[in-house]
Image: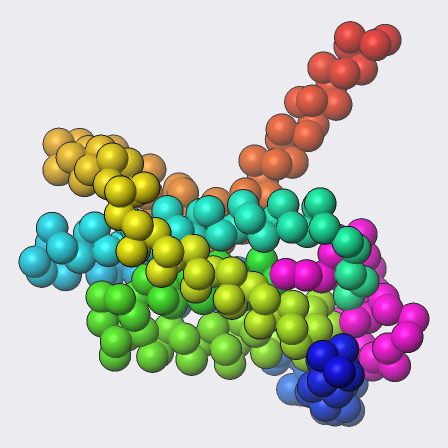
Amino acid sequence: MIRDIDLWITLFVNQHGSHTKPFDFFVIEILNRTTYNFLPVMTLWFAIFFMKPMETYRRIALEGLIGAFCAIMTSRLIGYLGPHHPRPAFDPTVPFTLPSGLGPHEIMRDYSSFPSEHATLAFAIAVSIWRASPALGVIATGWAVCVVAFVRLYGGWHFFFDLVGGAVLGTAWVLTLARARFLTARPVNILMETSVRHEPLFMGGLLILMFQMMTFFDDVRFLGGAVAGFLTRKITG
C-alpha cells in the first residue's frame, strides 16, 4: 500500500512533465541549482548566528549544523549500505516522463534514491532555524518543501517517500541532538570559544564548511577518490 501511495503521488506530480517547456526550464535549469536549493535557507541559518542574545542563538545554530552534518553522513551510509532503490526515471516499472531538457544522463543512475540527501539537509537546516525563530522556520520549511523537495520529485530524482525519509532523517537528528545536549556540549563549547577568540578564521572556516555541506562534499570526495586511485596504481603497478 505504501508503494502504491508513493507511486501515485510521484506520477501525479509528473503527469505534466515535458508538457510545459517554460515551466520545465524554470524547475530543472533554474531551481535545480545549489544556489537556489540551499543558499536561501543557509542564509537564514547564518542570520541566526548573529541574533541576540548571541550566546543562546549561536548554540542553537551550531547544534543544528552538527545535526545536519550527522544527518548527511547517515543519509549517505543508508544509500550505500541499504538496498538499492532505482530513481523514478530509471525504474522500469514506473511510466515516468522526463521533463523537457532533462536527459537520462543527468540523473545519477547508480545512486540509490532513498533517502534524499537534499531533503535531509534542507529540513535539518529548516528545523534548526525553527528552533531559533518560528517565523523564519516557516519560511525555511516552505522553501524546503516547495523548492528543494518539489524539484527533485518533478525531475525524477526521487520518489515521494524518498523525500519524506530524508525530511524525517534531518529533523530527527537535529531534534535528538537538541535534547541530548551532552552529546554536543563539548564540540559546541569549543566552536563557541573559537568564534570569539579567532572570529575571522572561524567565520572563514564556517563559510567553507557550509559550502561543502551544500555540495555534499563532492569536490572533497572527488579529490579523495582521485588520490586513492593514484596511490593504488602506484602501489600495485
Q: Quadrant of residue 32?
A: bottom right
Q: Residue at x 30, y 50 (%)?
A: 180
**The N terminus lies in which quarter of the figure?**
bottom right
Dominant secondary-structure state across the stretch colored magenta: loop
Q: Position of residue 185 (x, y in %)?
A: 24, 41
Q: Position of residue 104 (x, y in %)?
A: 83, 65
Q: Residue furthest left?
A: 53
Viewer-closest of 80 and 203? 80
Viewer-closest of 103 and 109? 109
Q: Residue at x 80, y 15 (%)?
A: 233
Q: Quadrant of residue 85?
A: bottom right
Query: Is any part of residue 154 visible from this angle?
Result: yes
78 versus 228 height, above or below:
below
11 versus 211 height, above or below:
below
Asked if the magenta segment contains residue 93, the reply would be yes
Relative side of 13 to 140, left or right: right
Q: Quadrant of residue 217?
A: top right
Viewer-closest of 63 and 99? 63
Q: Residue at x 46, y 47 (%)?
A: 70
Q: Residue at x 77, y 65 (%)?
A: 87
Question: How many callouts does the rendering have?
Answer: 0
Q: Position of residue 164 (x, y in %)?
A: 58, 72
Q: Position of residue 166 (x, y in %)?
A: 56, 64
Tell me which colouring the rendered structure shows.
Answer: rainbow
Asked if the magenta segment contains residue 97, the reply would be yes
**The C terminus lies in which quarter of the figure?**
top right
Query: Is any part of residue 195 visible from this angle?
Result: no
66 versus 7 height, above or below:
above
Please provide the residue range marked out in magenta.
Answer: 88-115
